[in-house]
Image (cartoon, coloured by chain):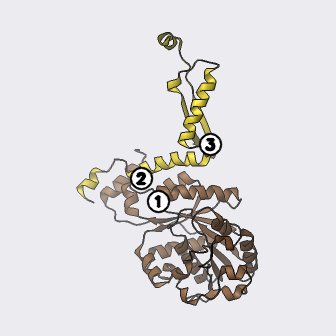
Chain colours: A yellow, B brown
Amino acid sequence: MSFFERLRIGRRGTAYTAKQRLQTVLVHDRSGLSPGRLEALKVDMIDTLSRHVEIDRGSVQLSLTKERNQQRLVADIPLASRRSRRRTT
Amino acid sequence: MSAKIITITSGKGGVGKTTATANLGASLADLGYRVVCIDADIGLRNLDVVMGLENRIVYDLVDVVEGHCKLRQAMIRDKHLNDLFLIPAAQTRDKTAVSPQDMVRISDELRQECDWILIDSPAGIERGFRNALAPADVVLVITNPEVSAVRDADRIIGLIEAEEKGPGKLILNRVKPEMVRRGDMLATEDILDVLAIDLIGVIPEDETILISTNRGMAASLDSKSIAGKAYRNIARRLNGEEVPFETLQGRDGFFGRISRLVRAGGVR
């Protein structure tokens, strides 16, 4: 093993990147929901929710996750705080 | 006799389906079983050249389906093993010449003739794959440690489960232990973690595969081939034997061992 290879010890190899990318792509593949369609769904959700409650549009998070064999669509929707509402109005 | 039907598939092309079929066929025949390998890749046949039987073809799978010959007439006996046979694919037709029902009918007829039927599936998820899957008792999914191959394997695993042919078993092919050790190749555990499928064997990258393919003889018949040995072990596992998974040896040094320990310790 060369000196430079020894220096690499402790850094994450490209296999780590490969695994992360695979996990993301497989979650989308399995759900049949591409990243683009997930984004479109997010916009629709925000529009619908906004008719009922004031939400912080820029901070909405919508993601696909996997727990064991169960795929989940997880939404984190922060409501607009009174303070921020006062700021924006 | 009532044969067990094993379909070897991958989704992605070029990951080793045909090589795996030839090697497992030879290994099972070498264990003393009567084995028939079927090339289901109509129009792009290759199992014949990998097995070294390309000059002996008279009839093919489509001839059997269309009734131009008897099943026995399309079975080509291997040059090295008396109880190993190939039913070649047709080269001048396409996948629509055979239906999944045809495959089930032929396989049922063949069941009485042998102990194992191995079906080499074409790449892709269309008709040819459906043909190969239809008669399967057990499906072996083969992949490489590459993101594209693993992704396609996942898709195939989903389709196998949808057809209630699952859960399949995984063959991880072309592993380079050195690269895994460096952290630059997905490790077996990473792939199992992502795919949620049981492992049946890991095949190391090995020059003897190409050399034996050049000659048209399975590497599993070469006692010096490490990939061949890995295939022989898969055959024994298929046969119900408990064979421990081999640890792949690459060059290793003090720092290699340290780095492995560090990685195993969950530094990431």
B74 vs B51, left or right, is right
- State how far apart marks 3 and 2 are (Cα): 24 Å
Q: Residues within 10 Å of mark 2 (few under 14, many from 20)?
A: many
Whole-percent x and y of residue A69? Answer: 63, 47
Whole-percent x and y of residue A20? Answer: 47, 46
The residue to which callout 1 is attached is B145
Q: Which mark is residue A71?
A: 3
Report which quarter residue A71 is drawn in.
Answer: top right
Q: Residues within 10 Å of mark 3 (few under 14, many from 20)?
A: some
Describe the element under mark 2 as helix, strand or loop.
helix
Whole-percent x and y of residue B3? Answer: 71, 77
Q: Which mark is residue B135?
A: none
Q: Nearer the viewer, residue A54 or A27?
A: A54
Contact, mark 1 vs mark 2 (Cβ under 8 Å): yes
Q: Residues within 10 Å of mark 1 (few under 14, many from 20)?
A: many
Q: Earlier in the sequence, mark 3 or mark 2?
A: 2
Above or below A66: residue B227: below
The residue to which callout 2 is attached is A15
Q: How many marks?
A: 3
Q: Nearer the viewer, residue B199 or A80?
A: A80
Q: Residue at x 57, y 55 (%)?
A: B154
